[in-house]
Amino acid sequence: MATHPTGPSYLSVGESLQYSEYGTVESMGGHSKGECQQCGSSSVTTERIVEHRCGHVSTATAVEDGPCPKCGQSTRTDTLAAVNTVCRCRDCGRRFEVESEPAGTALERREITFPELPTPTPGGELSWLPDRYLPTSDHGQRLLASVLVVVILLSGVAVAISVSTVLESEQTDAAPIDRTWEEYDTIVIFRNDDIQPWYNPEAMRAVDQVFIEEEVPVTLGIIPMVGGEQPITADETTCSYLRSLETEYPGQFEMALHGYTHEAQTDFYNGSEFGGMPATTQAEWLAAGEELMHDCVDRPSKTFIPPMNTYDESTVDVLAEAEYSVVSGGDWFTSMQYNATPPFEADGIRHVPETQAFENWTAAEDGTDEVPLYDLETLTDSFDRSVETNAVHVQMIHYQYFTSDQRLERLRSLIQHMKATDDVTFMTLEQFDAGLEADEIEETDDGWRVLEPIEATTANRGSVAS
Amino acid sequence: MSRVAAVGARLWTRLRSVRWLSVALFLSAVFPFWLLVGVMDDGSLYAVAGFGLLMACYVGWSYYVVTYRPWYRGVFGVGTLALVLCGYAVGIVVIGWVAPSPIQFVHLIAIALIFIYYWFIALIAIYHDQVSDSRATPSPPYPSLSVLVPAYNEAGYVSRAITSLLEAEYPTEQIEIIVIDDGSTDETAAEARSFDSDLVRVVTKANGGKYSALNYGLLFAEGEIIATVDADSIVAPDALTRIVAPFADDPDLGAVASNVTIWNRDSLLTRCQQLEYTIGVNIYRRMLDHFGIVLIVPGCLGAYRRDALEGVFAYDPETLTEDFDVTMKVLRSGYRVTVSDARVYTEAPDTWASLYNQRLRWYRGNYMTLFKHRRVLVDPSYGLLHRLAVPFRLVEMFFLPIATWIILGFIVWLALTGQVVQVLALFVFFTSIIVLIAALGILIEGEDWRLLVYAPLFVVGYKHFHDALNLKCLLDVLSNRKLDWTQAQRIEQRRADDPPPK
C-alpha cells in the first residue's frame, strides 16, 4: 500500500472533542437512510472515533475516562486526535460510516484486466521452453525437471571440484614472498630414515616433535612395503599422521622414498636392496614404491634414499628414467663408487650422501635391537668440520633408536649446537636440489649463497608440477 | 508375518512420499563443502568445526529446553552464548588456530555462517518441506473473515485488488471486504466505492498512515479472522481459503503469512527480487515456520486471529514496517506464527531508484522494530523467539552487511595484489553453493528455473546493494532523526503519468 505516515493532528489542550459521544443519526444529519446497512434496524447511534498518541484507535468513550488501555498513559484531550464519526447499530452492532458528499460518490466500475500471473508448478516452471521441447504429460515434465536438477547438481559438483584444484595450487604459492640472498658457511640436511608403520610410533612422533619445536626441516625416508609383507597404506594411522605433518608444517617435512622392502637382497657392498639387482626389478620396485607413496602421503618428493646406503649404476638409471632428482646414499659408499666430492651430479641425478650417522653401528652388540648413539662431541665435531670445509652436512638418523628422553635430548642438543653456530642454514634434500636447479642456491668460495626462504623454491616447483 | 508386511508397506509408503529430487539436490552440497574443507587450513577448520559444535549444542539445548524443560529456559541462553563465543574467539587465537586479525575473523565467521545456513537452516527447510503439516489443506466450514484493504493513492490498483478478492474462493456469507481509504488525493476512494455492496464496504479517514488506517478498519471488522491485503496486490483464487486453513486446528496460532510472488518479471531487477523471495521464503522462512516463529506476516497478504490482533492492540505508529512490528507483538504475546501456501502477487519495483525507496522503508523499519522489541533478546520467557529467531535476525541485519563489505574489500585487495585466479576461484566456488541453495528453493517452490541465472548476483552485486542500504538504514535509525515513509514508484501510475508517445 502506498501511504504516508503523516500522523494524526492532536487536539490542543482545553479543546473539547467536537461531538458528544452519543447522538442519533438524524442529529448528525449524516446517514441518509438512518438505518443499519446490515439488519435494517433504525436503532442507530453515532460514535466518535479517536486516536490516542500511542496509535490506539477506538471510540472516544473507551478512552476518555481513564488511561489508554493500550499504553496506560493519560488520555487528556491533547493526546487524542479525532479520526471520524461513525454509526453503530444498537441491534446488530455493525459499524458503518456516516455517508456524506462528495466522499460517497462512486465511479463507474471499470473493466479489470489482470496481468499475466506466473503459476509455480511442482518440479519447477518449464513453460519458457519452446513447445516442441516441452513434454505434454505431467510425467514427462517432471522427468524433464528431474533431468534439469541432475544437470545442475553435476555441474555444481564439477565446478566445485575444478575450482578446488585451482584453490589448492593457489594456496601453495598464495602470496608473493619477499626473498633475499643470504650467505652461509654450510648447509645442514637432516635425513630421518626407516619411517614405517607399526614400529615404535611413539619414537617416530617424539623425534618429529623435536624438529617441530626446533623449527628445523627434515627429510623422512619412508619404507613403502616394510619387510615385503604389508604396504604402508595398510596402516592408515601412519599415513594420516604423515599427511598431517605435510599440511600442518608445509615445507618442513619432505616425504622421500626409502627403498621398497628395506631388506638386503644382494651382497652388493656387504648388503643392498637395490644394488646388484637387475634393472627391471629395480624399476618395478621403484614404481610400486612410488605408487604406495602417492596413496599414503599428499606430496611424495623425487628423492630416493637407498636402504643400506648403497645403489648401483642401474639404480641411478632407473631413478633418472623415473625423473628422480636426488639420491642420498652413504658418504663412504658414494666416495668409493664415484670418487667425487659430494654433492655432485652424475648420470642425470644429484648425489647428496649422508655425512654423519647418529647411530654407532660398529659398537652395536650382536643379537640386540639396541644401537648405541655417538656421543654429542663426535657429532658436533663432525658438524664443525663441515662448517670449516664449507661442506653440505647431511646428518642421518634412524628414529626407532630414539627411545629415551636422554637420546632425544642428544638430538636436540646437536640441533641447538648447529643453530648456535653462525652462518648455518637448514633444509631438506628436495629443497637443496630445487635451489641448485633454480640457481637459488649457489656454491661460493666461502660457502653457499641461498635465496631465502628456500621453501618458496619447492613450493613454486610443487605448484607447477601439480 | 502379516505384521512385518504391514511395517514394510508403511515403510514403502513413507519412502514413496519422500521427494527424492530435493533430497538429492540438498545432499549434493556435500561435495562443495567437502572441497571447501579440503582447501581450509587445519586451524581454520578446527575453529569452524568448534563453532559449529557450539551452535549445534546451543540450538539442540534451546529446542529441548523450550519444548520440554521450560524451567531451565534461563540456562545457556543468548547472553551465555555470546559470552561463550567471545571466550571461544579468544581461545582459538591463543591456541593458534586463527591469527588475531579482524579480516581473518570476519572471513572465518562468514564461512561458519555459510555452514550453519546450509546445514542447519536449509536442512530444517528441506525436512519441513518433506513432512510439513502446517500447511493445512483448506476445508469447510470456513471461519468468518474480514479482509482489510488499506489504500492511499492506489487509483488503478485498488480495483484489481478488490476484484481478485471477490473472485477468490470463499463463502460469501462468511466474508467481508473493508477498503480503508487513508485520505487519498486521487480517485482511490471513488474507484473502491464502485464495488460497494454487501460484501465490500469502503470507509474513509484523513491521512494518518497505514497503521492508523488498519486500526480504523479493524473497528468495522466483524470476522473472527482478520486478513490484511495491500491495495496493490492480487490474491490467488485459493489464497483466502488457504490462509485461514491453519487456524482451524491450532488455537495457539496467532497469525499466518502468505507466499509473496512477483508478477512483473520482465527485467533483471525484478527477477533478482523474485529469486530473493524464493530463497528467503523457501529456505530461511521455512526454518522459522518449523518452530512457529515466523517473524514477518507480510502486508501484501496476512491473516490474524482476531483475539491475537486485538490482544496486542493491533498496529503501532513507531516503526515504518507495521507488518514486522505487529507480528513481533503477536509472537511476544505467546502465539505461534506460521506460513501458508496462500499466494499473493505483487508488483516489484522495476528501477533501482524505486527499489532503493522501497527497501529504505523496509530496512529502516526492520531496525526500528528490532530496537523496539530489544527486550526479546534478554528475556528467556520468549522461548525460541528469544533463542533463535531474533539472534539470527540480528546476525542477518547487523553482522552480515558489514561482513559482506569487509570481505569484498579483502577480495579486491587480493585481486589488486595479483591473485586474480584465487579470487575467481573463490567466486565460482561460493556461487556454486548459492546456485544449489537457489535451486533448492526453486524446486520446493516450483518456480521458474531460469531464475538460477541470477544466483551469481547474490554473491557479488545485488547482495552488496542491499547490504550497503542496510548499513545506511542502520545509521539513519541510530541518528534518531525523523524518517519519512518512502515508497517505490507504481509502474502503472507512472505509465499513466507519462505522456503518450507522439
Image (spheres, coloured by chain):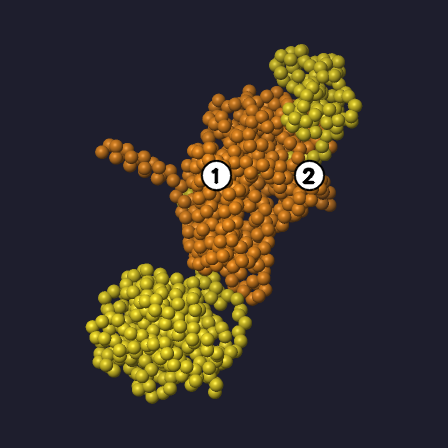
Who is closer to the viewer here, A358 or A177? Answer: A358
The residue that disc 2 covers is: B485
Q: Residue at x 44, y 45 (%)?
A: B56
Q: Which secondary structure lies at badge 2?
A: loop
Is the residue B470 above or below the residue A80 in the image?
below
Determine if residue A189 is in view.
yes
Residue A187 coordinates in the image, percent (x, y)? 43, 79
- The location of residue A67, given as percent across then percent down, is 67, 23
Rendered location of residue B382, percent (x, y): 52, 34
How many marks overall?
2
Q: Tell which chain the image draws in yellow.
A: A
What residue is shown with label 1?
Answer: B75
Q: CA distance from mark 1 to mark 2?
A: 41 Å
**Residue lying farthest to the top in this orientation:** A42
Q: Chain of mark 1?
A: B
Q: Earlier in the sequence, mark 1 or mark 2?
A: 1
Instruction: Name the front one of labels 1 and 2.
Output: 1
Residue at the bottom extreme of this rendering: A339
Q: Amino acid at mark 1?
A: Val
Left or right position of B15 against B46: left
- Name the kind of residue labelled 2 in the image: Trp
Quarter where residue A322 is shown:
bottom left
Mark 2 Cα-neighbour bin, 10 Å: few <14, some 14–19, many ≥20: many
Front one among A5 and A362: A362
Q: Up-down: is A85 above or below B231?
A: above
Which chain can be seen in orange?
B
